Image (cartoon, coloured by chain):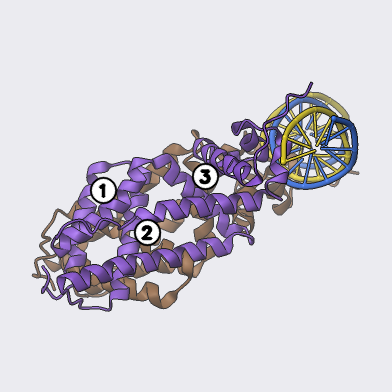
Chain colours: A purple, B brown, C yellow, D blue
DNA sequence: GTCTATAGCATGATAGAC
DNA sequence: GTCTATCATGCTATAGAC
C-alpha cells in the first residue's frame, strides 16, 4: 500500500520544489539546500527530485531566475507624483533598501545564492545577465526623470546610473549587516543629496 | 616505519592550517573548505586538524581574524601629500577598490567567508566586530582630513563616513561582479565629486 | 510519473597505537 | 604531539518496482 501522490505536471512539481528550495535557503542558508531537504519541505519523496531537475544546478538556476525577476522588478520603480530630483533619488534608494528591509531573510538568501552561483560554471551567466538587466532597468528610470524634469547631468547618465546602483547596493548590504534602520535612512538622504548635486541644477 | 613529522608548536601548526585554509577557500570557495582539503593542502595528515582546532568554527574564526586584520588595515590609508578634498575621497575609494582588484580571488573568498559567518552562531560576533572596527578606522581618517584641511561638512561626519563605506563597498562589489575597470574608475571619480559636494567648500 | 531502496562517496569527528 | 584507521552520518544520483 504505497499511497501514491496525486498526479501533477512536471512544471507544477518544479514550482513546488523551487518554492521549497527558497524556504530552505532562507532558513538554513545555501549549505542547507540539499535535495533531501528540498523534497522533504515540499512534502515529496526524495526520488521526486530527479525527474523534475537533472541535478542541483538547474534547481538553483530556476530559483535565481524566479527571485531576480520578481525582486528586481520592484526596485527603483515608483515614479509616483512629481518630486524634485533629490527626493526622486532618495525614493529610489529607499525602495531598494525597503526590499531588503521588508524581508531580510530572503534578501540575505539571495545574496548567498548569487555568491554561490559565481563559483558554479553552470550558473555564472545568470549573475552576469542579472546585473546587465538591472543596469538597464535603472537607466530607464533615470532617463525618465531626466526627460520629465528637464535635468541636465554634469556627467554622462551612465555614470550616474552606476553610482546609484553601487550606492544602493552598499546601503542595503550595510543594513543587512547591522540592521540599523536610522543609519540607513540617514545614508539614503545624504547620498541623495550628494548625487543630486551632480545635476546642473535646472531640475532642483 | 611511520615517517614522523617534525615537531612544531601548536601555534605554528595553526598558522600552517590557516594559510592552507585561505588557499583552499580562494581556489574552491567555502564549500571546498573541508578539514581534509585543508590538512592535505598544508601537507599534514587529516588527524592533525583536531588537535589544532576543536572543530571547523575556530578555524574559520582564525581565518577571518587574520584576513580582516590585514585587509582592513590598508583601506583608506594613504593620507599621502596635500590633496584637495575631492582627490582625497577619490584616493580613499580607489584604495579600497585596489584591494579588491589586486587580488580578486582573495577578496571574493573573504566575502564568501563573511557571508558564511553570518549563518554560524559561533561566528556572528566576528562580522559585527569587524564592521564596527572598520567604521572607526574610516572615521579616524576622515577626521584627519577634516582637521587638516579645515573642512566643514554640511552633515555630521558620522553620516559622511557611512556614505563613504557604503559607496566603497558598492563599487568594489560591483567590480567584483563585472570586472569593468574603467566603469569602476569612473564611478570612483563621480562618487568623489558627489561626496565632496557635501562639504561647505572651505577646503576645496 | 511516482516512489522505495540503495549504491557510492565525502564529510566531521574520534579512538587509540606510537 | 603525531598519525592511521575507522565510525557514523549525510550527500547526490540512480536502479528498478509499480
Specify the label residue B83 is tagged with: none
User: Residue, x 51% and y 58% (percent of image)?
Assistant: B108
In the rendered structure, the answer to whether residue B203 lies left or right of residue A74 reads left
Query: Residue B153: image x %, image y %?
Result: 12, 60
In the rendered structure, the answer to whether residue B195 lies left or right of residue A61 reads left
User: Residue, x 40% and y 56% (percent of image)?
Assistant: A72
**Distance of label 3 from label 1 (alpha carbons):** 23 Å
User: Residue, x 56% and y 59% (percent of image)?
Assistant: A118
Of A64 and B43, nearer the camera is A64
Query: Residue B203: image x %, image y %?
Result: 12, 71
Residue on which the image places disc 2: B169
Of A28 and A45, nearer the camera is A45
Q: In which quarter of the image is the N terminus of chain A?
A: top right
Same chain for mark 3 and mark 2? The answer is yes
Same chain for mark 3 and mark 1? The answer is no
Mark 3 Cα shell of 10 Å, populated few (<14), some (14-19), many (≥20): many
Nearer mark to the viewer, of 3 and 1? 1
Residue on which the image places disc 1: A184
Of B2 and B86, nearer the camera is B86
Q: Quadrant of the C terminus of chain A?
A: bottom left
Query: Residue B103: image x %, image y %?
Result: 51, 66
Mark 1 Cα shell of 10 Å, populated few (<14), some (14-19), many (≥20): many
Q: Mark 3 lies on which chain?
A: B
Looking at the rendered structure, the secondary structure element under dot 2 is helix
Q: Would you say residue B114 is visible in this rendering? A: no
**Distance of label 2 from label 1 (alpha carbons):** 14 Å
Looking at the rendered structure, the secondary structure element under dot 1 is helix
Of C5 and B105, nearer the camera is C5
Give above or below for A141 relative to A8: below
Residue on which the image places disc 3: B116
- Circles 3 and 1: CB atoms closer than 8 Å: no
Amino acid at each position: 500500500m504505497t499511497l501514491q501522490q496525486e498526479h501533477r505536471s512536471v512544471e507544477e512539481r518544479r514550482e513546488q520544489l523551487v518554492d521549497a528550495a527558497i524556504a530552505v535557503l532562507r532558513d538554513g542558508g545555501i549549505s542547507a539546500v540539499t535535495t533531501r531537504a528540498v523534497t522533504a519541505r515540499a512534502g515529496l519523496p526524495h526520488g521526486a527530485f530527479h525527474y523534475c531537475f537533472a541535478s542541483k544546478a538547474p534547481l538553483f538556476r530556476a530559483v535565481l531566475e524566479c527571485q531576480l525577476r520578481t525582486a528586481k522588478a520592484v526596485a527603483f520603480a515608483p515614479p509616483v507624483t512629481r518630486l524634485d530630483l533629490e527626493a526622486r533619488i532618495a525614493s529610489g534608494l529607499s525602495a531598494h533598501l525597503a526590499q531588503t528591509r521588508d524581508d531580510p531573510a530572503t534578501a540575505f538568501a539571495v545574496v548567498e545564492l548569487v555568491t554561490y552561483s559565481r563559483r558554479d560554471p553552470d550558473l555564472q551567466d545568470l549573475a552576469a545577465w542579472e546585473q546587465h538587466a538591472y543596469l538597464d532597468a535603472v537607466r530607464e528610470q533615470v532617463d525618465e526623470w531626466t526627460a520629465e524634469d528637464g535635468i541636465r547631468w554634469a556627467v554622462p547618465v551612465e555614470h550616474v546610473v552606476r553610482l546609484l546602483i553601487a550606492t544602493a547596493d552598499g546601503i542595503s548590504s550595510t543594513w543587512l549587516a547591522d540592521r540599523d534602520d536610522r543609519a540607513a535612512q540617514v545614508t539614503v538622504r545624504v547620498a541623495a543629496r550628494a548625487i543630486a548635486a551632480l545635476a546642473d541644477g535646472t531640475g532642483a
